[in-house]
């Protein structure tokens, strides 16, 4: 399901896209990044970058490092 068009600053858009990714994974379970991009109507490189950022944040939290 493509996300609706939203305008705003890049941090806001990034957060909306991250939330859309998390919701889709919660809804459908494990899914490839390319399929996430297709379902959400996002560029595959955008999905890859956001997933990497979220994974790094999780690693930092797991190791007690502030983000």
Image: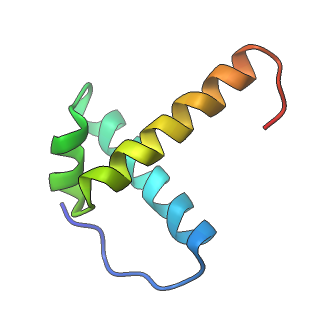
Residue placed furthest toward the top: 63
Say above or below: 1 vs 10. above
User: Percent position (x, y) of residue 58?
Assistant: 62, 26
Q: Quadrant of the N terminus?
A: bottom left
Outermost residue toward the bottom? 7
Looking at the rendered structure, the number of numbered marks drawn on it comes to 0
- Is 43 situated above or below 53? below
Please state if 44 lies on the left or on the right of 50 as rendered.
left
Percent position (x, y) of residue 67? 78, 38
Find residue 22 and report its horizontal and vertical position in percent: 42, 42
**Percent position of residue 28, x then y:** 23, 34
* Res 8 → quadrant: bottom right
Residue at image coords 24%, 58%: 40
Residue 17 position (above or below residue 50):
below
Choose top left, top right, bottom left or bottom right for residue 57.
top right
Foreground pick, 1 / 18: 18
| For residue 27, side relative to residue 64 (left or right) | left
- Foreground pick, 24 / 55: 55
Give the residue drawn at x 57%, y 72%.
10
x 31%, y 44%: residue? 24
Position of 29 with respect to 63 (left or right) is: left
Colour mode? rainbow
**Which of 6/45 is in front?**
45
The residue drawn where x is 22% and y is 31% is: 31
């Amino acid at each position: 399901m493509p996300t609706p068009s939203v305008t705003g600053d890049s941090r806001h858009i990034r957060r909306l896209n991250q939330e859309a990714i998390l919701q889709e994974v919660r809804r459908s379970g494990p899914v490839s990044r390319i399929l996430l991009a297709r379902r959400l109507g996002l560029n595959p490189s955008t999905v890859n970058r956001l997933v990497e950022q979220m994974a790094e944040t999780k690693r930092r939290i797991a190791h007690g490092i502030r983000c």
